[in-house]
Amino acid sequence: MKCIQTPGKWVTMRIPIRMISITTTIFWIFLIVFLVSAVYSAKDIRFDFGGPQIGLTSDNKILFSLPITIDNKGYYNIGCFNVTTEILDKEGFMITRTSTFIPVIEKNRRVMATHNVTIDINDLQNSQDYLFNDTELEVRETVSIKLAEVIPVQASTNLSMPWGAPLYNFTLGEIEYAGFNGTHMTATIPINFENHASFDLTGNIQICMYNSTNILVSKGQTTIETPQNTQYHGHIELNVPIIGITENGHFEVYFLTPLFEFGPLVIPYD
Amino acid sequence: MTEEKRDSNKRLQEFIRKALKATIKGVLFYGIYFVLSMFLAPVPEIVPGFQQMIEVFVMVYIFLMIIGELTAGTIFHHFFNGTKALFVILYLVFSLNGGIVGTTVQNVNLIIDLRLFLAVAMLLGLLGFAKSVLQAINFLNEKTEHVHF
């Protein structure tokens, strides 16, 4: 039996197959080496989040500053570094959303940035709750990077941030009347509250005194200056016409501070 | 009888050669996996199940590789090579959850987007599968091109 082979058509087919084989192998090696080295080099990337600092902006908003240091000692650049902070109230309403973006952090470089988050108290829904009651805010923190500028990695967490009320337990004490002249008396109204906030509270408290027939009998104001985490004990003196004094009535209290304006807060008296 | 014995010896030698080749390939592949796994050592601490996922992949891949080598010279060799290429594609798609890998570490949700890697790996897998199909066609072509007189 003799076996004759026709001219090698199959030889020409082997060449492209071999070419595909070589190309595929090269690409697989490149892909695996790149992926492994990118993941391996991630261990040499250091993120340092400093302690948050609280202050006020020039336009009187509460400012949280978070210093961030990124030390890239990996083999590749880091792309699209992004820190996003969302602060939500207990009803899930978004109070603020801030992002800090660094396009590229080159290898063997250290980059420092400050992530600033501002809160405008006037933007808070139901601001009365935040001014007079301690509560908790939900913070959603998201950090995303692109390893080797190609592989997106995102880390996110939910935190709970305590909110201290600047006018916690605000009360007006018993009115004390003292004679002023034949037609007027001096009404002394004690004011007490605790500043639980993380900022100092300065401003004015304005009080309007209404009698039982809803007639404005007197108004006055006092300046407050209460450092954070301290109690305020003060008073306001009003000149009240004797004929306007009734047994009961109500006060309308207005708060005017650089950070917020609020009022009227209606407090009855008797 | 002697010719039959010689033929049997030749077959045995051929099988030993294939087995040796398969063993070397398997050991080499496992060696590469071993070296690479050292670089990826911190990952299993963060992503639970990662080690198991990779080990299953390596085991099945080596198994298909050995079977493929042992069946070299037959159509099954190309069949197993094609299976290997498809296995790579399907295993990557399912184990990487479509390219978005997520885990939770101490109240921190970590998401790694490997869709680009998966796309490239799938393309390479498809190329490998196409190669196996071409090889199978070529193999059958070679067989039929032997004209007997």
Image (spheres, coloured by chain):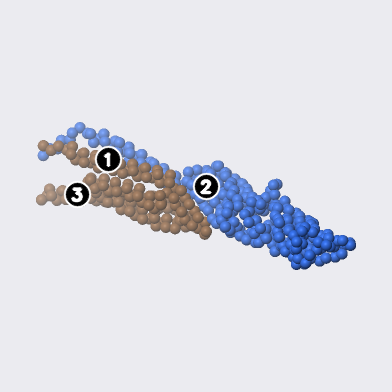
Chain colours: A blue, B brown
Nearer to me, B86 or B1: B86
From the image, state whether disc 3 or disc 2 is nearer to you.
Answer: 2
From the image, state whether disc 1 or disc 2 is nearer to you.
Answer: 2
**Looking at the image, which residue is at 38% across and 45% down?**
B121
Q: Position of residue A159 (x, y in %)?
A: 57, 58
Residue at the extreme top of the image, as rendered: A7
Nearer to me, A134 or B135: A134
From the image, state whether disc 3 or disc 1 is nearer to you.
Answer: 1
Residue at the extreme right of the image, as rendered: A182
Q: Which residue is mark 1?
A: B134
Amino acid at pointer 3: Arg
Any mark on residue B69, and which?
none
Quote the CA–CA distance across marks 3 and 1: 27 Å
Q: Is residue B60 visible?
A: yes
**Looking at the image, which residue is at 55% across and 56% down?**
A158
Amino acid at pointer 2: Ile
Amino acid at pointer 1: Leu
Contact check, label 1 and label 2, Cβ < 8 Å = no
Q: Which residue is mark 3?
A: B11
Which quarter of the rendering shows the C terminus of chain B?
Answer: top left
Q: Which residue is mark 2?
A: A145
Residue A191 lies left or right of residue B136; in this view the side is: right
